[in-house]
């Protein structure tokens, strides 16, 4: 599975799209950033009991969880109101779903390869292309878990994530600039 860094970079891609859609306030963008890593909050109960993987890659990494998150996002968007309420709800749901997509594109070094998209069924789905290296971690309490995250393998995985997601970010940014430039040229030629 990718690290929170890759998921956050995916959030930046979505924020870039959201800004073009009119969402620019800091609370909205912060909620989108949170949505990209929300599926990994399943680590917290496991860390508290000394087994970080206890609940990880189970229900929170499923289409059911994404649908529940979308419903909550829709309610939040409705309560928030404003011109872009629906777009905000859609963007929050997309941010959550991006987590599942990135996790599907990662090699996994342990049993239960892939993501349990159809949880509670024990069917794990993995994309045919693996762009990300797994983040290696050890069980045995918070100290061992955190220390295991600082391995050379994980630093290599982080560099790869930055290269992959950074390339995607640059490509989408340049595409946005090209679209804006094209619109300006059309408007100027009228």
Image (cartoon, rainbow, N blue to C red):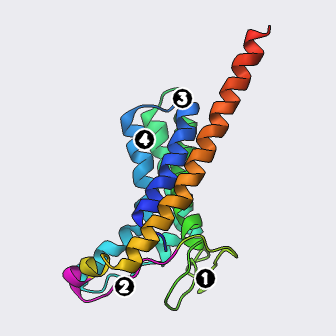
Toward which corner of the image does residue 28 lie, by quadrant? top left
Mark before the other along the chain sequence, 2 or 4: 4
Tell me the magenta residue range.
133-144
Contact, mark 1 vs mark 2 (Cβ under 8 Å): no
Q: Is residue 40 magenta?
A: no
Residue underneath mark 1: 124
> Residue lying farthest right?
190
Q: Residue at x 38, y 72 (%)?
A: 155
Which residue in the protein does label 3 denote? Answer: 22
The residues tagged by marks 1 and 2 sit, at their Cα atoms, a distance apart of 17 Å
| Among the two numbered marks 4 and 3 on one chain, the one whose residue lies closer to the N terminus | 3
Label 1 secondary element:
loop
In this orientation, does residue 70 appear? Answer: no
Predominant secondary structure in magenta? loop
Q: Is residue 58 visible?
A: yes
Residue 106, image x, y percentages:
56, 74
Q: Which residue is mark 2?
A: 54
* Mark 4 residue element: helix
Task: Tell me what residue is drawn at x 51 percent, y 66 percent.
Answer: 65
Marks 3, 2: nearer the viewer: 3
Element at label 3: loop
Residue 12 point in image, percent of width and height:
48, 47
Q: Earlier in the sequence, mark 1 or mark 3?
A: 3
Residue 139: within the magenta?
yes
Give coordinates of residue 156: x percent, y percent. 43, 73
Whether 172 is drawn above or below 26: the answer is below
Element class at badge 2: loop
Tag 4 near tag 3, CB within 8 Å: no
The residues tagged by marks 4 and 1 sit, at their Cα atoms, a distance apart of 31 Å
Q: Which residue is mark 4?
A: 29
């Amino acid at each position: 599975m990718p690290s929170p860094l890759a998921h956050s970079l995916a959030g930046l891609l979505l924020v870039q799209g959201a800004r073009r859609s009119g969402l620019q306030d800091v609370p909205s963008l912060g909620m989108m950033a949170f949505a990209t890593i929300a599926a990994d909050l399943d680590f917290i109960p496991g860390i508290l009991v000394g087994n970080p993987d206890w609940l990880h890659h189970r229900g929170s990494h499923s289409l059911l969880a994404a649908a529940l998150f979308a419903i909550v996002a829709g309610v939040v968007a409705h309560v928030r109101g404003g011109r872009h309420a629906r777009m905000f709800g859609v963007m929050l749901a997309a941010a959550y779903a991006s987590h599942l997509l990135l996790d599907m594109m990662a090699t996994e070094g342990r049993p239960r390869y892939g993501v349990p998209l159809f949880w509670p069924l024990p069917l794990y789905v993995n994309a045919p292309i693996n762009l990300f290296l797994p983040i290696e971690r050890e069980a045995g309490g918070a100290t061992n878990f955190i220390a295991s995250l600082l391995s050379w393998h994980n630093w290599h995985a982080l560099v790869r994530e930055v290269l992959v997601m950074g390339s995607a970010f640059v490509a989408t940014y340049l595409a946005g600039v090209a679209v804006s430039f094209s619109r300006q040229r059309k408007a100027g030629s009228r």
